[in-house]
Image (tube, rainbow, N blue to C red):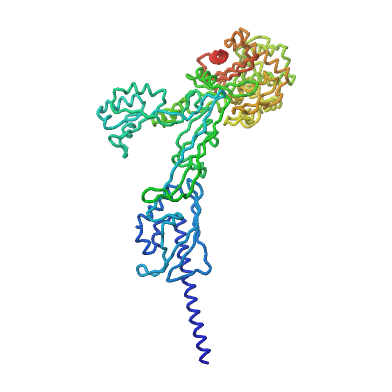
Amino acid sequence: MRRIGWLFFTMAILLLITAGCSNDQQKAQDRFDKYVAMWNKEDFKGMYGYLSKDAKKTISEKDFVNRYKNIYDAIEADKLKVKASKIEDLEIKDHKAVLPFEVNMNSVAGEISFEENAAVVQEKQGDTENWYINWKPNMIFKGLKQGEQVRVATQSAVRGEIMDRSGKYLAQNGEAIQVGVVPQQFSKGGEQSIQQLSKTLALSEKSINQALSASWVKENQFVPIKTVSQKDASNTENSLKKVEGIQQKKVNARVYPCEEACAHLVGYVAPVTAEYLKEHKDEGYNAQSKAGMIGLESLYEDKLRARDGVTIYTVDKDGNKKNEIAKVNPKDGESIQVTVDTNVQKSLYEQLKDEKGVATALQPKTGEILGLVSTPAFDPNSFSFGIDANTYQFLSTNPDKPLMNRFTKTYSPGSTFKLVTGALAVDEGVVNPNESISISGKKWQKDKSWGNFYVTRVGSKPNVNLRDAYVTSDNIYFAQTALKLGLDKFNSGLKQFGFNQKMPVNYPFETSKIAGDQDIKDEGVLANSGYGQGKLQVNPLHLALMYTSIVNDGNIVKPILMNGDESGIWKKQVISKGTAQLIQKDLVDVIEDKNGTGHAAKIDGLTLAGKTGTAELKKTQGEKGQENGWFVAVDTKQKNLLVSMMIEGVEDKGGSHYVVPKVKNVFQQYNK
């Protein structure tokens, strides 16, 4: 009996010991789980409270918190995930245990992942006995030792460049000149030096003083004030040569040789904003990144973008490199070449630079886009070099809207649209182009049901055929023609010409519309639309494309912007070959006939076909309102250039006649 009793006693003791061990194992695991939960929340102060006495001797709470925070900030740690491994039979010896864990995070150098072990110890701190983490630096990164630091090094990549069809740079990785001062010498000139610098650099005195009063500025140290182009540097140097303390330094910069002429087309690169970072989260951008903001720079950002290389590594107390934690190699951006001809682009800009307007140029046989201009414009170099607050304020509040890209918008086309109405009517057989119809007076309405609405014309002949209607731009003829076509044929014909459809080109052009998002449903609107008014809205490039039909046997070519893209047809046989030839001949007479509205564009040696248009922007009939002047012309013999141009506010400048000589100048310069 004694032996049985002793056996039971021994078993009871063993059960108590086992229960105690099991309880300690669970407490150690639970304690470390709580530590890991705080780690995932980056609650570094809370984590410090779980450190053992020995660990706290090696690092203060402030240094512990700062070390984690500074390292994670430097490597741009994101999506941190720490996971404690579960041990079924945790070994506890001398109140100590080892718990494995794994860490995963994204960083500026890509994903970082490692496994490590945490030593935990059971000890009394204050009045409480519990499990604490015997923290070491290798819990931040595997292999990190006491006294070692984490470093981030960047290896620069090069952004792709943008070239025109002949290889001329539209956006280039070049150099600019940084103008700055050395305060110790500059201050000798006092207010006079600041005033001279302000005047020369077109900067406010306030912004100069702010730069000089920055916390990092030292008396004998170069302080950058403004970056200017190399072209402007010599003028700046001459203007400031008598001012002491001025220095100029070459810096790498994104340079735009085409300047204002290509501003909206090419765009610019600038430092990213907080909003941009939010929109492009997880795409590798950081607060120091630059990106394309508008135009080709933005549109082809993914291809052009330089992706800098980054290495995260550790160094010892002497700065010697020890271990590499993560690395991503630099990747240069790809350069692109577009179909744009810089000479055509500049020629268009020269004609428009003092206007609010837009111009497009095409190779009418291939569809290659030779020019896209919006005015007024701005110098993209200002943004690339670092635009000052005053300049940006002027650009953003200017009522002429120089930052707005007009060639992507849509407008009322005026009489340039008569190409479409006439061509559709001939193809549908609703008009005989050789038959003259009688039109009396300068006002017309279908019947009394139109009330106070009527159609007016400027060119007036008592008997008018299609050719005469084009030459004199007879609104009444084309209003009547639209009514003969009828709503269904007119609406379907416009869709045939590409209305309500996105143009097949990678650029954010607005879509030409018939009547908003709907078809025309009213006869009055139909009549008005016949001569390009009504609710019609046309993109300038789309308008140019419509005119390619008269030199391509009735086909509209596909627009091409990227050099090397295959040419083709966007809209096949929008009109018949015979009709295309007929309309071309009539539009040649618009220029060749001395009474033609486009006669001022006649050039000896060239045979241009074209059409003028004056779009009236007014709410009620009879009132005086803004007029936009249009002219579209194409070389029908060489078939190498087609230009559409629109200038806003020509009501006191002769209407569309103000635009005609400007387009003529472009053709003359192109054919020199």
Q: Is residue 625 among the parts visible in the rendering?
A: no
Residue 79 lies, with reference to residue 95, above or below; the image says above
218 left or right, relative to 100: left
- Who is closer to the viewer here, 4 or 38? 4
Percent x, y for residue 272?
46, 38
Percent x, y for residue 282?
51, 45
97 left or right, relative to 646: left
Percent x, y for residue 195?
30, 26
The image quadrant that residue 541 belongs to is: top right
Residue located farthest toward the right when viewing the structure as drawn: 429
Residue 530 lies, with reference to residue 307, above or below; the image says above
- Who is closer to the viewer here, 75 or 616? 75
- Who is closer to the viewer here, 638 or 491? 638
Tag count: 0
Q: Is residue 288 among the parts visible in the rendering?
A: yes
- Who is closer to the viewer here, 116 or 202? 116
Point out the image quarter for the C terminus: top right
Residue 208 lies, with reference to residue 358, above or below; the image says below
228 left or right, relative to 424: left
Percent x, y for residue 347?
52, 18
At x 36%, y 26%, the residue is 201
At x 38%, y 48%, the residue is 319
